[in-house]
Amino acid sequence: MAASRIRIGVDVGGTFTDFVLVDDHRQLIYLGKQLTTPRDPSRAIIEGIQRILREAGVDIGKLDGVVHGTTLVTNTVIERKGAKVGLVTTKGFRDVLEMGREIRYDLYDLFLEKPEPLVPRHLRSEVDERVDATGAVLRPLDKDELRTVARRLVDQGVEAIAIAFLHAWRNDAHEREALAIVRAEHPDLPVTLGSEIAPEIREYERSNTAAANAYVQPLMQRYLSRLEGELHELGHRGTLSIMLSAGGLTTVRTASKFPIQLIESGPAAGATAAALYAKLTGNDYLISLDMGGTTAKMCLVEHGAPEHSNEFEAGRVKRFRKGSGLPLKVPVIDLIEIGAGGGSTAWIDGMGLLKVGPESAGSEPGPVCYRRGGTEPAVTDADLLLGYLSPDFFLGGDMALDLDAVRKAVETRIAAPLGLGVEQAAAGIHAVVNENMAAATRMYIAEKGRDPRRYTMIAFGGAGPVHAYGLAKLLKLRRLICPLGAGVTSALGFLVAAPAVDLVRSYVARLEVADWAQVDGFFTDMEATAVERLVEAGARKEEIRFERRAEMRHVGQGFEITVPLPDGPLRASSLDQVRAQFFETYEKLFGRRIEGIGIEALTWRLHAAAPQSDVTLRFAGQKADTGQRIKGERQVFFPETGYAPCPVYNRYALKPGDGFRGPAVVEERESTTIVGPDSTVHVDRFLNLVIDIDQSTVAVADTEVHHAHNG
Amino acid sequence: MSREPSGAAEFDPISLEILWSRLISIADESAAALLRTSFSTIVRESNDFATGLMDANGDSLAENTAGIPSFVGILPRTLKHFLHRFPKESWKPGDCVITNDPWMATGHLPDFTLAAPIFHRGRLVGFCGSIAHAPDIGGAGWSSDCRELFEEGLRVLPVKFLHEGRINELARDFITANVRVPDQVLGDLFAQVAAADVCARRTSEFLGDAQIEDLSALSSALQDRAEKAMRRAIEAVPDGTYRASLDADGFDADETHIECAITVNGSALHVDYAGTSKQIGRGLNSVLNYTYAYSVYPIKCALDPMTPRNEGSYRSMTVDAPEGCLLNPRFPAPCSARQLTGHLLAGVIYRALAQAIPDKVIAESGSAPTLRSVYSGVDRHNQSFSQVFFASGGMGGSAIQDGHSCTAFPTNTGSGSIEAFESISPLLVWKKELRTDSGGAGKFRGGLGQDVDIEVTSSHPLRLSLLSDRQKYPPKGLLGGSEGAPVEITLSDGTRPHPKSRSVLQPGDRLTLRFSGGGGFGDPRERDPAAVMADVRDGYVSAEQAHGIYGLLRDPADA
């Protein structure tokens, strides 16, 4: 990719739209923020782009590209504001969407709410057709019935149609036929096929994904084409790329066709930014913490690549509760999100114990200290009382915080009922929210069979660097990295991402009896499709890299593991190599191998990507503050010392090579980094704060999960 | 009576919250390790497993969040049997004791219960344990028609499966020689060992971090909090004795009857099953541990759903059933399909409690008990297969909402994918859809059951084992709500296979399973007419039922 370019990354969040402009030529990075305009997100985008271009002194005609991530898709599903969709299914199966997994996500709540299906029953229609698990046609598609069904749905006013037939993952002929028939009669109606959006076994997840794609498609098509038009009107002649949930970039055309793949577009940027820092700082094992106003997101980044998953749960009716949403088969960056942010509120449960979150005061009314009518003490309020935040330097001094009101609220709502002092209660709120994040991170890592202690943490988001030190200690991490500009770090992810595509085919077979010619054919097909899409997105054919994987398991097991496959043609003679790869992966995850039980593969995946952009982001051109490094001192609470005087550093005056001991508070405009007394800080050449926590205070324990008793 | 624990004063409400949430997270991490490495379909499709952490007395301190009702409170009871056999002083690091004895543990043979000691700085500070449904336990397989426990499979009395980390080869060989899939059964036992390993290591680490010597003071503080929460919840129920009874299909002519009396006295609650049928000579008997678990669970759901569980949660509740009855059978009563009895208890308990706290309970569920059909034989590759078809009836309605359709209660079994099911068995599912009019009518109606049609595509006959109930006695409604539709099981030739026994399916046979809907809640004539119209529009309720039972005057076609 060209070395000197000017690009803008735009991250539309719930409250703010963040902007990053990178000018490779002048080695400059500009950051910007604009209040999100929820009714028409493109308004804030256009205004913000114009503003940042002005600040950087760049003419829009010189702009090479705009990269965009959006929470529009996910919000449409959460708020149920999508299109009226009709679903066509195989006869006997129109309730797949409603029955779901038939499970209660909360074992003790007799009155739990389940997510409504995206398509109500009267808009779900059946047609006579049937394919079996081997792909053989048992009953042909009844075309007349299909025509009638489609007409009736259109008469009922549907704005999009999803077609999801049983076993279409194995044979999509009937879905293709159905598509042609619907197209012929209703050429402007968007149609999603299950076999195209998620050609994977398991009808509920596939149908749901098809329905969800249809559900968000009309809205996203309108939005993307309007944004493209407006940018063009302004004089933009470069590319407009959209961030996929898996962290790759795609074109407006592909995004309009498969908009459901943008469902985690926003969070993907943060993880991609973390991956950039992993490479910059040479960390092979990184945990990213992105903590904002309402949530904290954690993601593992190993060897420079974030973890991926092929499933995502959207629109949870009970926020953060696994199982309470709609499972989608979409390639995503695998991260965990919990209700722990600056706005998370503290409360006392039925047992008289202190709880924090998942409810959040959000930005309206916000924490008590914002003086916007918030009455419930929030995490930010506790952080203020503990001296972590300055009442005078919040958002660089743009917002004065009300310490007295906070003290009163914490006293009456928390401290007095628990019989504690105000400071003790504040320390408790800070500790409990950290513990919540630690517990979630431990589970997230345990489910992958790994041990957190080998990881370095990178923290960003407004509240990330305030809590990262406490969280790192709970997880027994030794090193913590806080990049400059924590509030907009995640937008940097847009600028390093490269065009990418993930494709999949399902074919269930025991390895010993698998039809390898067929598998080989899958990969040939998928590689051709991938090349076509990536070239359209601006990649050069020869630079595209492919990774093949298969989801495999022992026959009888319910969990698949993702196993890398060899390059080159696959034949029966590849069997030994594939089996060896399976054992190696299995052993790495579970610490043992089991001989004598068959191995089967279910799903075959291809990941194709162009190389990522040049990652040597230089801050050399950045204006430095020539003032004093230490701008003052205040009373700050640490569990080891209680309230004690602590120096306050000016982040903008720190230069590469600087170093100091904790305790320290380091202030910048969008965030504050807290460093405990048992730590050493140094500033690296990227202006990151690298914080090393003394090891005497962290028990050195075994680093790997091992199973000693395998007899 | 609430015991004032020693040392509770050492922990403030913040430390306690943090320490408790860490202990639960240890139990959850241990569960994650078990789930990741297990083979059993039932473990993963039915969440049929649990992990827990006990203090040095063997009292429960934390249980995994998603642990299922059948195992509530059982781990510490089994551990006490282990401690009787192997006194506390004899446990060494790396020991693992197992059993599947129904009376000591979970009420039937397929579940293995495993416990291991936790040492910290050389001292025994507690125990970790797990329960998991094994892929096979020999004997008759999963069926309810055995006449004695001995037909149902292998019974393993408490034995050290691992001695200081070394496997007990005799025990291992004895187990693997008596089950159909030895590698998988052994694999799952090691999944339980791995879970214990994680739990023991994390607990010791936790004690180090928290700088406390052992679990005892923390344990009594936490149990005290949980006990107080449960007692407060019981105190909110007016004192008195509330009675209800229930009839079930039983086995052939042997119908079963359950009598339930719940006595609330201040902060104590007692469930008494005196008057219940005698134990029967088929595998429907529910041993007292299982009876206890399925009694305490629905009560906790109704009275105090939010508080995490530990030993203290159960101190205020007692459960009694006369020895020799269906709910407390004597050894060696067959008990393989004890869920067909145990799952019924929630319904009878809620009918009793509805007299005092109608807003906090639900009507009987069509998924209680679950309807299971197990298919085995050879597939088209001439490989032997065995598949359970997982699906559920509807939940009962309540004072605030309709019951959920096709949702298991009181157990929490999911349903698998039909595509996955067809990929590994010579069976074809022609239909799986909501069963119109199956939800019991009511102000809030019961959830719908489902209709399933399955065809045998194998060229060989297959064996079918059915485990079902609710054909003669469908789920009852509450406070004027109607019954849900009964279970119906028929073959294409019009015959009805035995609902609780094994039969043979011929190639081309088509089996129809009609799952029960949940009972309704309140008078159907009080249902919001708009809700009735919507039900008709979506086909949940027929126009006939809308007019006849709900009294809808308008023609739904006008909507």
Image (spheres, rainbow, N blue to C red):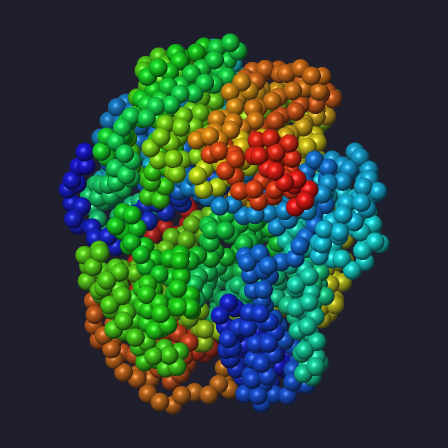
Q: Residue furthest front?
A: B553
Locate residue B548 relative to residue B240 in the image: left or right. right
Residue A25 pos. (x, y %): 60, 85
Q: Residue at x 65, y 77 (%)?
A: A65
Image quarter of residue A625? bottom left
The answer, for residue B40, to whether it is visible in the render is no
Quarter occupied by residue B553: top right
**In the image, what residue occupies the spot 64% across and 29% down?**
B452
Instruction: Give coordinates of residue B375: x percent, y percent.
Output: 61, 23
Decide which of B400, A107 is in the foreground and name it: B400
Q: Is residue A402 above or below residue B322?
A: below
Count of marks placed on residues: 0
| Front residue of A154 and A20 | A154
Q: Quadrant of the N terminus of chain A?
A: bottom right
Q: Kindly tell me whether residue A307 is visible in this rendering.
A: yes
B256, above or below A171, in the image: above
Q: Position of residue A267 (x, y in %)?
A: 53, 63
Position of the C terminus of chain A, as image quadrant, is top left
Comparing B320 with A659, the one in front is: B320
Q: Is residue B326 left or right of residue B145?
A: left
Residue at left offset 66%, top offset 63%: A219
The residue shown at (68%, 42%) is B557
Image location (x, y in percent) of residue B205: 30, 49
